[in-house]
Image: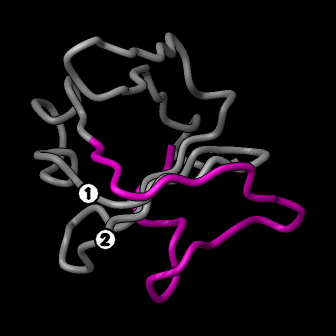
Amino acid sequence: MSINQAHYQGGLLLYQGEQIVNHSKNVTLAFDDASRQYSDVFRGKHKGKVFVTTHRMIFLSDDLRDSLLSFAVAFMYMKNLRVEQPIFGANYISGIAAAHPNGECA
């Protein structure tokens, strides 16, 4: 998991050899447990775009004044993923994103 490391001048920053598999606009990102314990970066709801690449999932904020400009998590650090399709609500994906060991990016 990395914060504000996957963007550059409003665009997406990819690793060498990484390819975009899918992307979605008008996405809302919210953090449940982390928002109570950690920085203000995790608080509130963030609107933007999500990119699924061959290596990770990346969120880019639409608001350049937001404290969370980008959020990226490698697939190997994601667990308990669930895709929910409620009858009277919007579809969503939930899960747990773990930090990289020692704060290093993979």
Instruction: State the count of labels.
Output: 2
Answer above or below: position of 56 versus 95: below
Image location of residue 45, percent across then percent down = 16, 47
Q: Nearer the viewer, residue 53 or 26?
A: 26
- Amino acid type, residue under disc 1 in the picture: Lys
Left or right of 45, for residue 83: right
Disc 2 to disc 1: CB gap under 8 Å = yes
Q: Residue at x 50, y 66 (%)?
A: 5
Q: CA distance from mark 2 to mark 1?
A: 6 Å
Pointer 2: residues within 10 angstroms few (<14), some, or many (20+)? some
Image location of residue 57, percent across then percent down = 58, 45
Find residue 30 and report its image quarter.
top left
Left or right of 50, for residue 53: right
Q: Residue at x 31, y 71 (%)?
A: 62
- The magenta stretch spans residue 74: no
- Amino acid type, residue under disc 2 in the picture: Asp
Pointer 1: residues within 10 angstroms few (<14), some, or many (20+)? some
Find residue 61 and report its image quarter.
bottom left
Residue underneath mark 1: 47
Answer above or below: position of 79 versus 76: above
Q: Nearer the viewer, residue 44 or 102?
A: 44
Answer above or below: position of 55 versus 3: above
Residue underneath mark 2: 62
Q: Which residues are magenta?
A: 1-29
Q: Residue at x 57, y 73 (%)?
A: 12
Mark 2: secondary structure: loop
Q: Residue at x 53, y 80 (%)?
A: 11
Image location of residue 99, percent across then percent down = 49, 35
